[in-house]
Amino acid sequence: MNTTRLSLFDSPLFLGFDQFEKTFDRMRKAAADGYPPYNIEQTGENGLRITLAVAGFSMDDLEIEIDNNQLTIRGRQQEDEGERIYLHRGIAARQFQRSFVLADGIEIRGAVLDNGLLHIDMERVQPESRARKIEISAPAGVENGGSHPKAIDVEDAGEASERRRK
């Protein structure tokens, strides 16, 4: 049976977004595990804070990493090997991994561990303008590209399109 999987990025207008789709799939699977619980709050006009409840974890037990706009927090407690004898063990030394996808322009400002809460502060910075000129080359073996301009400005293209519609 041939099944077609529909996705948000199935449109031919979304080119090169397959990495986002893989990230969404990974995040959807990770969301099923609710440990550790967390909050996301806005801390000012451009500030954000993620707070994770990591009771029992020390700074040495936690690792924070950012890679390709994905923030990953890992926790691994050191096992007490034969040092303690438990009559009841209700607090497990549970390891975890929690990931968040960050939008472009979000920068991590720092992290603080305070009273069993890990606070990760972020800030939304203003992106630089991405408008640029794209050079147009003639096909291989053709000397002069004819009357076509060598480059087209993105803003000029919009004006030209508007003139053609009139």
Image (cartoon, rainbow, N blue to C red):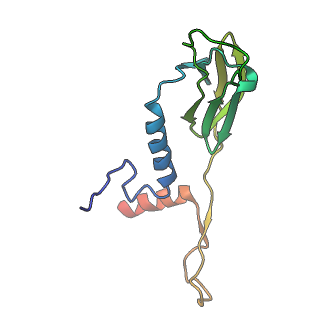
Q: Tell me where residue 72 appears, x and y as whole percent.
A: 62, 35
Up the image or down, 87 lies above or below 26; here it is above
Up the image or down, 106 lies above or below 45; here it is below
Instruction: Name the foreground residue: 39 vs 123.
Output: 39
Picture quarter with the C terminus: bottom left
Picture quarter with the N terminus: bottom left
Q: Residue at x 64, y 40 (%)?
A: 127
Q: Quadrant of residue 59?
A: top right
Q: Which residue is drawn at 62% across and 89% down?
A: 143
Instruction: Name the foreground residue: 78 vs 123.
Output: 78
Q: Tell me where residue 67 appears, x and y as whole percent.
A: 65, 43
Residue 67 placement, left or right of 99? right
Q: Can residue 144 be seen in this view?
A: yes
Q: In which quarter of the image is residue 132?
A: bottom right
Residue 71 placement, left or right of 166? right
Q: Can residue 17 be seen in this view?
A: no
Q: In which quarter of the image is residue 140?
A: bottom right
